[in-house]
C-alpha cells in the first residue's frame, strides 16, 4: 500500500478504531471515558483521539453521559460493520492461514478497514459463516448468514477433514513451514489437483493422479480443499 493511500485512509481508520473500541467495551459491559479509550487504543495525549471522538459526538454516532462514552443506534450500526470485518479477518488469518494469534489480530486491524460489504460476505461464506472469532467473541452475522436455514460448512476444509471415499480439489496451500511447499509440489498436492481420501487412520492416505500417498498429519493440515461429491 502506498504512503499516499495510507494518508488518505488514516482519518477514516481512526474513526473506525474508536467505534470498534466502544462496541467491544459495551459488549463486555465496560464503561469508557475519553482518557480510558485512549489507553485502550494505546494513544498518547497528542495523537488527536479526543478530536476524533468530538467529530463522532457532533455526527450523532456517539453520545456522552457524564464522562462515559456510548454508541448511538447509528454508531452501533457503523461499529458493527468494523467489528464484523475484524473478527472475520482474524478467523481467516488464524484458522486458514495459520498465523500466530497476535499476528492474526494485527493483520486483521488493517484488513478491517479495507473490506467492502461484498468482500466481507465473500470471506464469511468462504469460512462457512463462523459464529465466533479466535478469541471466542461473537461475529455479528451479515445478510449472507441470515439467509441460511441451517449451518453451512466452510467452502474450504483441511485435507484431513474429508470423509474416507470423498474427493476434493486443492485450492490453498498454507503449511506452517514454508519449506514444506516444495515437498507438497513433489507429492502432486498443488492447487487444482483432485485428491481422493482413502483413509484417515492410522495415517492419512490419499490418491492423487492414480498414485497413493501417505501424508503426514502436519502436511495434511496445511492443504485446503474444496470438497466435491463422492465417487
Image (spheres, rainbow, N blue to C red):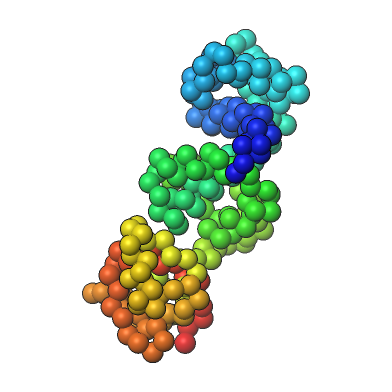
Instruction: Tell me where residue 51 appears, x and y as whole percent.
Output: 66, 17
- Nearest to the observer: residue 39 or residue 163: 39
Q: Residue furthest front?
A: 3
Q: Which residue is situated farthest in the right direction here?
A: 59
Question: How many dots with numbers?
Answer: 0
- Image point (46%, 41%), residue name: 105
Q: Depth check: 136 or 39 in front?
A: 39
Percent from the top left, x then y, of residue 8? 69, 34
Quarter of the image holding residue 173? bottom left
Residue beneath the point at 31% across and 81% down: 213
Query: Looking at the image, which is closer to me, 64 or 174?
Result: 174
Image vertical order of residue 216 relative to residue 17, above or below? below
Q: Residue furthest bottom?
A: 210
Height in image: 1 above or below 189? above
> Is 174 on the left-hand or right-hand side of 66?
left
Which residue occupies 69% across, 54% down?
A: 118
Q: Is residue 70 above or below residue 84?
A: above
- With respect to residue 62, does 187 lie above or below? below
The residue at the point 54 percent across, 31 percent down is: 24
Left or right of 25 on screen, residue 65: right
Amino acid at each position: 500500500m502506498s504512503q499516499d493511500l495510507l494518508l488518505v485512509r488514516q482519518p477514516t481508520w481512526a474513526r473506525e478504531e474508536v467505534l470498534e473500541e466502544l462496541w467491544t467495551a459495551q459488549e463486555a459491559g465496560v464503561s469508557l471515558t475519553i482518557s480510558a479509550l485512549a489507553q485502550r487504543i494505546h494513544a498518547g495525549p497528542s495523537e488527536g483521539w479526543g478530536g476524533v471522538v468530538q467529530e463522532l459526538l457532533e455526527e450523532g454516532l456517539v453520545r456522552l453521559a457524564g464522562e462515559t462514552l456510548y454508541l448511538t443506534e447509528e454508531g452501533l450500526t457503523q461499529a458493527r460493520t468494523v467489528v464484523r470485518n475484524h473478527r472475520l479477518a482474524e478467523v481467516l488469518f488464524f484458522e486458514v492461514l495459520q498465523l500466530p494469534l497476535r499476528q492474526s489480530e494485527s493483520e486483521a486491524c488493517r484488513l478491517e478497514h479495507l473490506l467492502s460489504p461484498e468482500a466481507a460476505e465473500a470471506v464469511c461464506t468462504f469460512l462457512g459463516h463462523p459464529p465466533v472469532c479466535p478469541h471466542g467473541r461473537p461475529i455479528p452475522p451479515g445478510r449472507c448468514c441470515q439467509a441460511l436455514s441451517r449451518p453451512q460448512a466452510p467452502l474450504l476444509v483441511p485435507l484431513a477433514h474429508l470423509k474416507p471415499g470423498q474427493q476434493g480439489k486443492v485450492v490453498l496451500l498454507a503449511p506452517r513451514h514454508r519449506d514444506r511447499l516444495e515437498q507438497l509440489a513433489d507429492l502432486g498436492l498443488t492447487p487444482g489437483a483432485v485428491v481422493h481420501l482413502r483413509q484417515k487412520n492410522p495415517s492419512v492416505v490419499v490418491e492423487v493422479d492414480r498414485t497413493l500417498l501417505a501424508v503426514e498429519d502436519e502436511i495434511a493440515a496445511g492443504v485446503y480443499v474444496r470438497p466435491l461429491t463422492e465417487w
